[in-house]
Image (tube, rainbow, N blue to C red):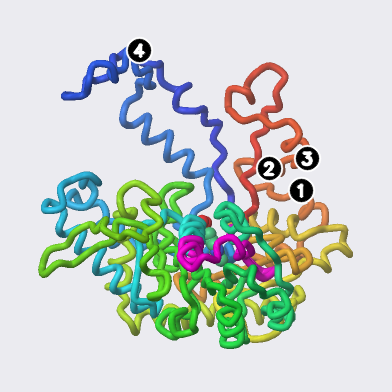
Amino acid sequence: MTFRQARWDEPPIWDIGRASDEAAPVIPGLPERWHRKSPLQWPELSELEVLRHYTRLSQMNFGIETMTYPLGSCTMKYNPKISERLARLPTAAELHPNQPEETVQGALEIFWRLERALSKVTGFPEISLQPAAGAHGEYAALLMARAYFHDRGELETRTEVLLPDTAHGTNPASAMMAGFTAHEIRSRDGCVDVDALRAALSERTAAFMLTNPNTAGLFETEIPAITEAVHAAGGIVYYDGANLNAILGVTNPGRMGFDVAHLNLHKTFATPHGGGGPGAGVLACGDKLAPYLPVPRIAKRGRRFALDYDRPKSIGKIKSGYGNFGLDLRAYAFLLAHGEEGLRHISRRAVLNANYAAHKLGRHLPRPFRPLVKHEFLLSGAPLRQRGLRTLDLAKRLLDEGVHAPTVYFPSLVEEALMIELPETESRRDVDAFIAAVERSLADTDANLKTAPHNLAVGRVDEVRAARELLLSWRDLRSPGANLETPTPPATGP
Ligand SMILES: *Cc1c(COP(=O)(O)O)cnc(C)c1O
C-alpha cells in the first residue's frame, strides 16, 4: 500500500472569506454593559466553502480513522460511532450544566450508572467523574492526600511523593503542583526495585505513585510487597490507571490494595482524546480517601438523583459542572456494549496484539525487557546508531508508510526507546501491516531515513532552528523574510 498525503496550500479561514461587518447578535436578557460593541468580523463564507476548508485540513492530518496509531501509553483506539450518535442526541447534547436537577434526572442517572460500572471495573466503592484529564485526576487525588494528612496532623512532615523512573511525566508534575517534592525510585528489569523503595520510605512519605501495567508494558511483579511497605510507612498508594487495557475484567487496583486510582476514559474506554479538548480522568478510591473526593457527588435518594455538595471534608470543586457529560455517556455506551465478558476479551486481544508484534519486531531491534508484555512493549533503536541514524529517523520514516509513529524517547531508562501499543481495535491485518511498515522502513537507505518524511503535507523541520526562532502564528510565517516552511507535527509522545 502506498501512502501519499494531500498537500493543500490552505490559508487560515480568516484569509479566505472577507471579514463581515455584521453586528454581534443581542442576547435577550444580557445586561447592556456586556453587549459587544464592535462588529463580529467573522469570515463570510458559504457552507460549501467552510466544508472544503475543513475537509482539506483533515486530509493533511493523521487520525485513527485513516491509519494505525501505535502511540504507546496513549491507547489510541477506535471511537465507536454508536457512542458518537448517542452523545449527539439533542436530549444529551443540548443540556445546560446549570439546569435545575429535576430537569436532568436522566443525565444524573447516567452519571450514577457509569460510576457504579466503573466501581466494578476498579474494585473501589467510590467514584468521581469530575476530573477533566488524567493529570487532573492525579492532581485532585494528591490534594485529597493533603487533606487526609492535614486531618491526621501530619501535613507538615509528609512532604514527599515517590515514583518509579518509568513514571509518566504527569506524575511528578502533579506531585509538584500539589505542593510535594517528587523523588525517583530506580527500576530493576523494568519493574520497581522494592529494596530501593523501602530505603526511600520514611515518615516524610506522603504517597507512592505506580503505573500498572507500567510504561515498559510489564505487570509489576511485587505489588503486595509495595502496597504493604508504603502503608507500613503511613503513605498513600496511588494507582495510575490511565491505561487499563491489559487488565479489564481480569483484575483491578482495589483488589491489589491501592488507596486511590485514576482512569482515562479517553484511553481505555474509547472516548475521543479530543485534540486538547475535553477528556475524563475518573477518580476511584476506597473509604480512607472517600470523604475528601471533590464535590458535587452524585447521590441517589429513592428514585431521584441529586448533586450532593454536603461533604464537609471535600477538597471542593475542581472544575465547572460535574464531569464531561458527552464523554461519560460515550464511555457508558462502550461499557454496556461490551459487558463484563466483552471487557475481558478486549484485554486479551490487546495483550495478544502487543505480544505478537513484540515477538516479530524483536527480530529486528532489541527488546530491553524479555518477560511477557501486557498491552504495550518497548524496543530500543540504539543499533541504528551504527548507521548514523536515530530512533527519530525511524519514527519519521514510518509516517511515509501511512502509520502514525510510536511514542519515542520514553521511558527514559531505555536508550533510543520506541514504545508501541496496538489496541484491540487493530485487526491482525492491521498489526501485520504495521510490522511490514517497520520492516520496510528499516530496510530503506540511510539517506531516505535521515530526510523522511517525504510523502506528507510537511517535511522534516530543522528542530534547532524551530526552537530558537519561534514563530507562533500564520501571520508571522507570512511576514517578509520569514521561513515559509511550516513545522512538522511532533512525532509523538505522552
Ligand atoms: C496519558 C497518561 C496520563 C495523563 O493523562 P492525560 O489525560 O493526558 O492528562 C497519566 N499517566 C499515564 C500512564 C498515561 O498514559
Residue occupying the point 59% across, 58% down? 175
Residue type beneath disc 4: Ser
Residue occupying the point 58% across, 22% down? 475
Q: Position of residue 67 (x, y in %)?
A: 51, 59
Distance CA(mark 4)–CA(mark 2): 41 Å
Residue type beneath disc 3: Val
Marks 4 and 2 in Cβ contact (< 8 Å)? no
Q: Nearer the viewer, residue 79 or 440?
A: 79
Number of other residues with Cα within 10 Å of mark 3, as a class: few under 14, some 14 to 19, many 20 or more: few
Mark 1 or mark 3, earlier in chain: 1
Tell me the tag on residue 451: 1
Q: Is residue 113 above or below residue 17?
A: below
Marks 1 and 2 in Cβ contact (< 8 Å)? yes
Q: Which residues are magenta?
A: 145-170
Tell me the tag on residue 38: 4
Residue type beneath disc 1: Thr
